[in-house]
Image: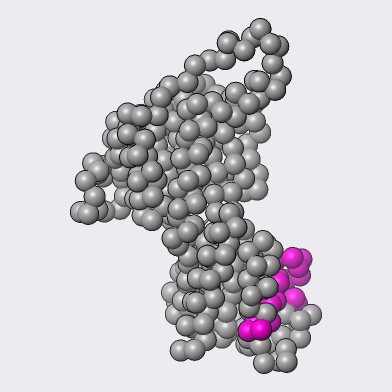
Amino acid sequence: MDSELQPLLVLGPPAVLNIFKSQYSHKYRFLNAFSSDLPLLQFLQTQNTQPSSVRAIFCNQRQLVTADIICSLPSLGIIATSTVGFDHIDTAECRRRGIQISTVGSQLAADVADMAVALLIDVIFKISAGDRFVKKLIPFKLWSFPSASKLGGKRVGIIGLGRIGGEVAKRLEAFDCIIMYHSRNKNPSVSYTFYSNVVDLASDSDVLVLCCPLTEQTKYIVNKEVMLALGKDGIIVNVGRGALIDERELVQCLMKGEIGGAGLDVFENEPNVPKELFSLDNVVLSPHAGALTLDCFMDSCEQVAKSLDAFFSS
Ligand SMILES: O=CC(=O)O
């Protein structure tokens, strides 16, 4: 019976939810507030649900879990996000209330790392640009496409050597890239060169790959100074969060040729993407799709389910 099911407030789009629903509808009553325009309390009323009966939220980065939302739910004990990043959740309010935040990991890290490498290869070898070129080709011009540079030997500065950054490093090592990194602390278990300063890392790198979480400390970690240090042939790949880069400056640097190119899976004001980037052949854009593989969805669902099980059985 419905009344025996745990209410689970869903704040995120249907893709992962639909998979989760198909597997766990015997346990949870899904309150899909993401598709509702109503304020939360009104929405819960339409679902005949008391705010105090909601102990868990299932979300992802497409909807903010604000202090207001958290405050409306007096019994909330866990926020399970099907993402690695949790910058969409008001962590200060969670700390204050002792609310647990659970995130997901390994499959997602692997897929996002693959996306980072794919974007880098695309920018370096001009694959998307070449595709556009061939499709509007006047045959005798085939050989006039600008040449690419090789990936092997490139010095890659990874910002954030956590799970995703570690996977990126592993993959790019196999391409004979030289790996360096910046993170909050030096990681004694890796031999890559550590930089405590991002500008220094950028001046010694051909490529910067952003993989760190977005926090107050990392917002705009790549600013104009960092981009100028990277230089006119430098490439930036961002699979972390858009606001890790000062996007306005990024657009300017790309348009003025102050950096060489960019592969971007994330944007500062998603779902908005700066239109100036659309006509740049040295820029490859992707719709925050690094973690959109079916394997990733399945794995995330399993991990969210485990966290919720542990929470409800404790
Ligand atoms: O963006 C995706 C994630 O943080 O998992």
Of all residues, the one furthest to the top in this rendering is 140
Answer above or below: position of 32 versus 186. Answer: below
The answer to which image quadrant residue 301 occupies is bottom right
Residue placed most toward the observer, 132 or 102: 132
Residue 81 in the image, given as x and y percentages of width and height: 54, 67
Of all residues, the one furthest to the right in this rendering is 46
Q: Residue at x 23, y 41 (%)?
A: 193
The answer to which image quadrant residue 37 occupies is bottom right
The reply to whether residue 309 is visible in this rendering is: yes
Any magenta on residue 312?
A: no
Q: Residue at x 22, y 54 (%)?
A: 189
Q: Residue at x 51, y 44 (%)?
A: 115
Answer above or below: position of 177 versus 54. Answer: above
Residue 166 in the image, given as x and y percentages of width and height: 35, 50
How was the colour assigned to the protein in this rendering? one colour
The reply to whether residue 203 is visible in this rendering is: no
Q: Residue at x 66, y 7 (%)?
A: 140
Answer above or below: position of 82 versus 174. Answer: below
The count of marks equals: 0
Residue 249 in the image, given as x and y percentages of width and height: 50, 33
Residue placed most toward the observer, 272 or 191: 191
Any magenta on residue 37?
A: yes
In the image: residue 298, left or right of residue 135? left
Q: Quadrant of the N terminus?
A: bottom right
In the image: residue 229, left or right of residue 7? left
Answer above or below: position of 68 versus 203. Answer: below
The stretch of residues the image draws in magenta is: 26-43
